[in-house]
Image: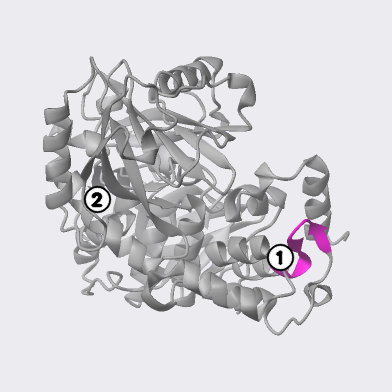
Amino acid sequence: MSVPAATFAPVPYDLVIVGGGVNGIGIARDAAGRGLGVLVLEGRDLAAATSSASSKLIHGGLRYLEHSEFRLVRESLKEREVLWTAAPHIVHPLRFVLPVRPGMRPAWVLRTGLFLYDHIGGREHLPPTRTLRRGRAAAFAPLRDSIRTAFEYSDCAVDDARLVVLNAIDAHEHGAAIAVGWRLTGARRAARNWNIDVESSGGERRTVQARGLINAAGPWVTSVLASAGVPRHRALRLVKGSHLVLPRLYTGRHAYTLQAQDGRVIFAVPYGDSYTLLGTTEIPYAADAAQASVSDTEVDYLCRGVGEYLREPIEPKKVVWAYAGVRPLYDDGSVDASTVTRDYVFDIDAPPDAAPILSVFGGKLTTYRRLAEHALAKLLPRMHIETRPWTRGAVLPGGDFPNRDIEAFTARQRVRYDFLPPSTIRRMCRAYGTRIERIIGAARSVADLGDELAPGLFAAELAYLRREEWARCADDVLWRRSKLGLQFDASVVETINRWFAGGV
């Protein structure tokens, strides 16, 4: 399959979707699978903003129960196993340990919340909550002696940016055009269509038509409304969440949910094979979302918050990567940024006999598939289109191996491609699943994969990423299609950029 990264047909579309994050791409996949003509406009890269700056979790949001967001939690919990089934190469079950600490929420409150967490979402395959006691569970080893009791519960980890890319591949294979490097510059209603002005990163300009417009631009949702001359009916609240990645802080594949002094929670999650991810902060944000960064205050907050639980202090100087993302939340009037709803809300502007526009406010990674279903259920009747949802139970590209057993699948690939290091096979299986064949194919030796541009990264993989995943530069490869940027220095970035430019 050849995926033209920055070309699309000059034909009328049923839907033009602005935004290549998880919500926009999720809607595109769903709509294309229903037979609609879809064009996605993404000015930078897939998952370039909020969708690659998450906590990397598919979770119900245990703390949202405190704010009575039962609908959101129930929907999120139901989606955990749906997404695990759809993409078992990038979604993995994870056990979270929630220590009981004096002065924080009492044990009975935590246990009551976890009872609800276990039962309101229709959990089928993930194991239930259990109580842990010091002396009987290895999870206490890195924790301070004062912590004697904890609860262990289930959620899932995910490669967030790859979740977006896999949805984009599936959308494209169902007929959607994915225009990476193109942005909306203006839109005008004409009779029952939108005339949409677009511009490429290289300065090329075009106008396309669509029966409906979906604004899933995340932090820039209000800017798109302004460009389309549409009044805003919903309020947007920008909240910055920052995360830190450090060398592995403890052994074991479990995560920790830690209560901070201010009532928020901080996650400590195994990341890759060698790191621990800490997050997140939640602070109001009013600047350019594309320039969001982690402040020294946030680094100190996360290190101190986790350090209050661990035996060994966490030194900020050991942080190997810090990233921040801006969450475009629906402003429900909450005073505290941490309590603003994570639920999604739609703003529809659809005058009689005029082309509609639907804008997405809020949402979270876990609920993107249901958000897509709900968005189309709201919009398509306004366009007199009747279709049915189809994505529940549909496997994402690469996830079609038996029993969601990524370890067994990886073991088979190690035998098949025994000329590659096991670590390389493991990484590729967890990124591409069965589509590893599209990279390695009939290769019988390392030489068949082309130049090794960095340890374990061959020209054959870059060619695949450019051909089928819209990658255009080193950042696309190292920080979104993978997290290899944690391992390589600036010289590798230059080498990969030269390769994309044709100089390698």
Give the total number of marks visible in the rendering: 2
Identify the image quadrant of residue 112. Answer: top left
- 127 within the magenta span: no
Crowding near the residue tagged with mark 1, few <14, some 14–19, many ≥20 C-alpha atoms within 10 Å: few
Mark closest to the chain's N terminus, 2 or 1: 2
Q: Marks 2 and 1, Cα distance to the nearest angstrom?
A: 37 Å
Kind of residue indicated by mark 1:
Pro
Answer yes or no: is residue 466 visible.
yes
Mark 2, mark 1: which one is toward the viewer?
1
Crowding near the residue tagged with mark 2, few <14, some 14–19, many ≥20 C-alpha atoms within 10 Å: many
Q: What residue is at 28 percent from the left and 26 percent from the top?
A: 148
Residue 297 lies, in percent from the top left, at 50, 14
Q: Residue 468 vs residue 343: left or right? A: right
Give the secondary structure at mark 2.
helix
Give the secondary structure at mark 1.
loop
Residue 395 lies, in percent from the top left, at 38, 73
Q: Residue 66 vs residue 240: left or right? A: left
Query: Which residue in the structure is indicated by mark 1?
Result: 421
Residue 445 lies, in percent from the top left, at 79, 78
Residue 170 lies, in percent from the top left, at 45, 71
Q: Which residues are magenta?
A: 452-461
Q: What residue is at 42 percent from the left and 32 percent from the top?
A: 141
Q: Eyeballing the image, is 84 above or below 121?
A: below
Kind of residue indicated by mark 2:
Ser
The structure's colour scheme is: one colour
Q: Residue furthest front?
A: 135
417 or 216, nearer to the observer: 417
Q: Quadrant of the N terminus?
A: bottom right
Per the rendering, the mark at residue 303 is none
Query: Which residue in the structure is indicated by mark 2?
Result: 76
